[in-house]
Image (spheres, helix red, strand yellow):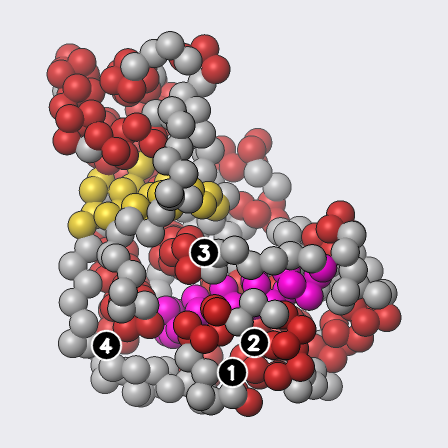
Amino acid sequence: MDIKKSKTIQFSHTINKRLFILIAASITLTFTLGSCNKGKKIPDVSHIEANLEIIRFEKEMYGIDSSNITYKANELASQHPEFVEIYTSPRVMREKGWTDSTDVAVLEHLMKGRPMQMLYDTCMVIFDDFSSYEKELEQAFQFYQYYFPDAPLPKVYTCITEFVYQGFTYGPEVLVIGTEHYMGKDFPAYEAIFPRYQSQFFTPDHLVSASMELMVGEQITDHPENNMLDAMIREGKKLYILDHLLPYEEDSIKLKFTSAQTEWCNENEHEIWKFFVTQDLIYSTDKRKYMKYTNPAPTSPGMPTESPGRTANWTGWQIVKQYMRFNPDKRIQDLINEKDAQKILKGARYKPKR
């Protein structure tokens, strides 16, 4: 299938604070909760409706009588034609040997596969009831509509991608969540597929944050990346926006850091910046060199082992926060529209905490 050029697909490769989050949703939102929200001004979005359409596609695929697969595959293709076209494409589930197969044939093949059925059964132990996640997503999309009033609400599909994708978007209208990527850090299958520094964040607590991160990516587009500063500021913008969409969520969840790694960054902000400066990384154009600090990694090379990967992204977030603090007239859309990373650094008057 040829992906429509007018849309982008953004892919992302993750108990329980559920009661806390649901209580938070009912509070007048100028209130702040806990130390992680100290100083935040959280708008009241209780008047905004975010009636998401959430399709449990994996349940429609696998929660059926196995003798009825052909009929069900045709029904799914008829009911969800755009999603089935995406899902059965070479980018997602279609294997090389199926190039001449129809979308329905690919669905049938997947539905008959015993490993996929077993994976579905395992996922349903945690995600059979999706209501708590639905409430969290709806709250996040209340904030999304507040900050992006002209953006459409996406149709949300949950599915199983056989560990291919944690989630993806198809333009701003479709958000896809691969539930098998949120089974908990000790889920046995992860050990053979993913490095531990990634799979430790494949937990149910990360599902909403990782999904909203994809939606943020739909807003941050066409940003230049000529050096590390460009990458830092772009990723810092994403974290800044994600923080506004999930104002009650812990920073460590949004960052995909452990609590200890988050605290390490908070305590070593000056040293992190000093390292980037002394190593001539800020304006480095060598992507192979600086991506070690913007991409997932067990730690940041050259820094203590307590450091997380993606310290450049965390630093970019601090710069963006200071920029917005020193420019109170700026709104999130103004931040997005400003694509000159050097201008943002200068406007932030960035002074890392010692």
Residue 98 image-quadrant placement: top left
Q: Dot 4: few (<14), some (14–19), or many (≥20) neighbours within 10 Å? A: some
Residue 73 image-quadrant placement: top left
Q: Which residues are magenta?
A: 227-251
What is the C-alpha distance between the residues marked 2 and 4? 24 Å
Q: Does residue 170 appear in the picture of this structure?
A: yes
Q: Which residue is mark 1?
A: 324
N-terminal label among 2 and 3: 3
| Quadrant, the C terminus | bottom right
Residue sitting at 63 percent across and 60 percent down?
231
What is the C-alpha distance between the residues marked 4 and 3? 22 Å
Residue 347 at x, y percent in the picture: 62, 84
N-terminal label among 2 and 4: 4
Q: Which residue is mark 4?
A: 45
N-terminal label among 3 and 1: 3
Question: Which label is found at residue 217?
Answer: 3
N-terminal label among 1 and 4: 4
**Element on which disc 1 rests:** helix
Q: Is residue 248 above or below residue 190?
A: below
Residue 208 at x, y percent in the picture: 36, 57
